[in-house]
Amino acid sequence: QVQLVESGGGLVQAGGSLSLSCAGSGRTASIYDMGWFRQPPGKEREFVAAISWGGSGKYFADSVKGRFSISRDNAKNTAYLHMNSLKPEDTAVYYCAAKHRDYGRYDIGRNYNYWGQGTQVTVSG
């Protein structure tokens, strides 16, 4: 079992920046690929970004390319989502998730085995 806890959400003005953290515990979180998803109000959950277990592979949704970055520190069992140039449409509950390494596409939520509880990000216009 892996437990994931997100932190770092909050309220930010459009154009601002925010960084989210996802701390893993339980089985060694470093063996898992990590992803970030979000669910805007009234909409379906969508893929945001993902990083391979070793950190060499990084993947982003078109909507966040060039604005968001992703990283991880396996020594701390923590993944990060760095969000810049935030827009009101980035408002959502953000979830981190873990999947078995190299299993399935990064952008599909059902491939992930463990999920955090979510953290709210609100971007005011």
Image (cartoon, helix red, strand yellow):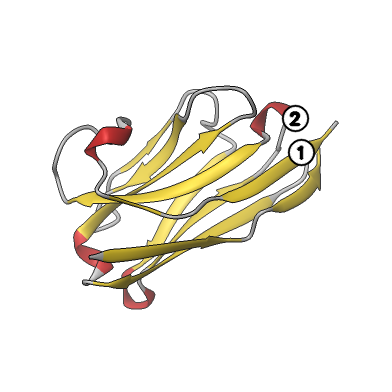
Please give the name of the residue rendered at 23% of the width and 57% of the height, measured from the top-left corner. 32
Residue type of the residue flagged with mark 1: Val
Residue 36, percent across and down?
44, 44
Q: Residue at x 75, y 30 (%)?
A: 88
Classify residue 113 as left or right of residue 75.
left
Q: Are marks 2 and 1 in contact (CB under 8 Å)?
A: yes
Q: Nearer the viewer, residue 101 or 44?
A: 44
Q: Amino acid at mark 2?
A: Pro
Image position of 102 (left or right of 29):
left
- Say which of 21 and 57 sits in front: 21
Tag 2, which secondary structure? helix
Q: Secondary structure at mark 1?
A: strand
Left/right placement of residue 98 relative to residue 119 reads left
Position in image of residue 64 (x %, y %)? 54, 31
Quick one: label 2 or label 1, which is nearer the N terminus? 2
According to the picture, the residue beneath numbered tag 2 turns out to be 88
Identify the residue at the far bottom of this view: 75
- Residue 76 shown left or right of residue 53 in the figure: right
Q: Which residue occupies the foreground of this view, 33 or 68?
A: 33
**Considering only vertical position in the picture, is 8 above or below 11?**
below
Quadrant of the frame with the N terminus = bottom left
Checking the image for residue 123, the label placed there is 1
Which part of the image, by quadrant, shows the C terminus?
top right
Task: Please provide percent x and percent y for residue 19.
Answer: 61, 56
Using a 10 Å C-alpha cutoff, classify the residue at mark 2 as few (fewer than 14 neighbours), some (14 to 19) or many (20 or more): some
User: How many residues crowd around disc 1 within 10 Å: few (fewer than 14), some, or many (20 or more)?
Assistant: many
Residue displayed at 30% across by 30% down: 108
Instruction: Residue at 43% x, 55% y: name it.
Output: 116
